[in-house]
Amino acid sequence: QELTTVRVQDPRVQNEGSWNSYVDYKIFLHTNSKAFTAKTSCVRRRYREFVWLRRQLQRNAGLVPVPELPGKSAFFAGSTDEFIERRRRGLQQFLEK
């Protein structure tokens, strides 16, 4: 049976303390599918790259619904660490769907 797992983990704040700081996440993929040459891969991606991916999926999905992304704004969202963890879980759910 073919199996593919994807994990969103290890959030890191880049350019911390500057006006252009952002968080990126490690995306780890493991599969035994014959459709993939590499059985594991790992990249770092930031939220806006997920937004780009969702737009591409919507453009090509036809009538198939595309999952939602977690919210963008951290304002009034509790602590920064809590917000980052909520977003990480939301991105994980997006990729699983």
Image (cartoon, grey):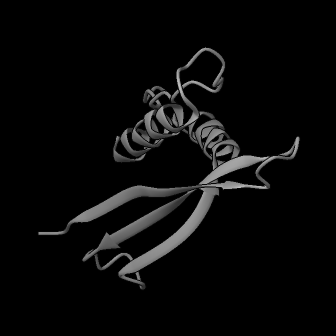
* Residue sitting at x 47%, y 31%: 66
Percent position of residue 12, x then y: 60, 56
- Seen in the image, is 53 located left or right of residue 4? right
**Residue 77 sits above or below residue 36 on the image:** above
State the count of labels. Answer: 0
Report x, y in % for residue 42. Answer: 49, 73
Is 41 placed above or below 29 here?
below
User: Which residue corresponds to the image point at 64% horizontal and 43% vertical from the top-left?
Assistant: 47
Residue most extreme to the right: 19
How far from the left and from the top, in percent, is residue 81?
51, 38
Quadrant location, the C terminus = top left
Q: Quadrant of the N terminus?
A: bottom left
Q: Quick one: which residue is furthest to the left in this view?
A: 1
Position of residue 90 measured from the top left corner of the image (x, y, whole percent): 43, 35
Closer-to-camera residue (25/62): 25
In the rendered view, does 8 fall on the left or right side of 75? left
Say if 32 sits above or below 14 in the image: below
Q: Find residue 19 and report its image quarter.
A: top right
Between residues 71 and 75, which one lies in front from this camera angle?
75
Which residue shows up at 68% across the image and 43% down it?
Answer: 52
Q: Is residue 23 above or below residue 26?
A: above
Quadrant of the rendered image containing residue 15: bottom right
